[in-house]
């Protein structure tokens, strides 16, 4: 299944902020977490993730610092900031409204149509 660009773009910020709310991660680990959360159906690329992380950092929602992995590789780790947590809470509320509305629409679409009988 291919997920449309618009849906990926709309969900990217809350996904990354939500992932980082569990703890600091480096880019590859974020990509892997997105894939894991979606059962492999969302495969983000570096070219999609890093511009988003840089934008979130410019906005003050994410901070970054250099560290070293267990293997000795230098990696940039990203962390959610207090401002990022506020934005995440707002986005969670917004997505809950959208998800509830979609659920109602889809449930209505599943109901059998009852033919009206005119006497």
Image: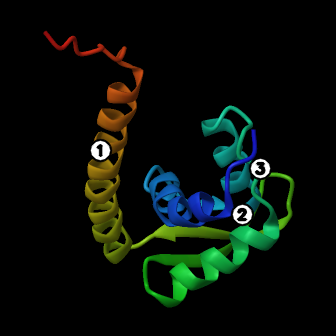
The secondary element bearing badge 1 is classed as: helix
- 74 w.r.t. 35: above or below: below
Residue 57 picture location, percent across and down:
53, 83
**Number of marks:** 3
Q: Identify the mark nearer the N-term, 2 or 3.
A: 2
The secondary element bearing badge 3 is classed as: loop
Residue 99 picture location, percent across and down:
35, 44
| Quadrant of the rendering where the C terminus is positioned | top left
Q: Residues within 10 Å of mark 1 (few under 14, many from 20)?
A: few
Q: Are marks 2 and 3 in contact (CB under 8 Å)?
A: no
The alpha-carbon separation of the residues under discs 2 and 3 comes to 13 Å
Task: List the residue tagged with mark 3.
Answer: 43
Task: List the residue tagged with mark 2.
Answer: 27
Seen from the viewer's position, the closer of residues 38 and 72 is 38
Q: Are marks 1 and 3 in contact (CB under 8 Å)?
A: no
Task: List the residue tagged with mark 1.
Answer: 101
The secondary element bearing badge 2 is classed as: helix
Seen from the viewer's position, the closer of residues 23 and 49 is 49
Q: Residues within 10 Å of mark 3 (few under 14, many from 20)?
A: some
């Amino acid at each position: 299944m291919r997920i449309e660009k618009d849906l990926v773009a709309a969900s990217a910020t809350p996904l990354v902020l939500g992932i980082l709310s569990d703890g600091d991660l480096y880019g590859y680990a974020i990509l892997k977490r997105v894939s894991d959360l979606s059962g492999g159906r969302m495969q983000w690329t570096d070219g999609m993730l890093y511009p988003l992380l840089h934008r979130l950092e410019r906005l003050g929602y994410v901070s970054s610092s250099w560290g070293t992995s267990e293997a000795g590789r230098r990696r940039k780790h990203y962390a959610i900031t207090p401002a990022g947590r506020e934005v995440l809470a707002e986005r969670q509320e917004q997505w809950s409204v959208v998800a509830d509305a979609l659920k109602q629409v889809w449930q209505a679409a599943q109901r059998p149509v009852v033919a009206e009988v005119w006497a």
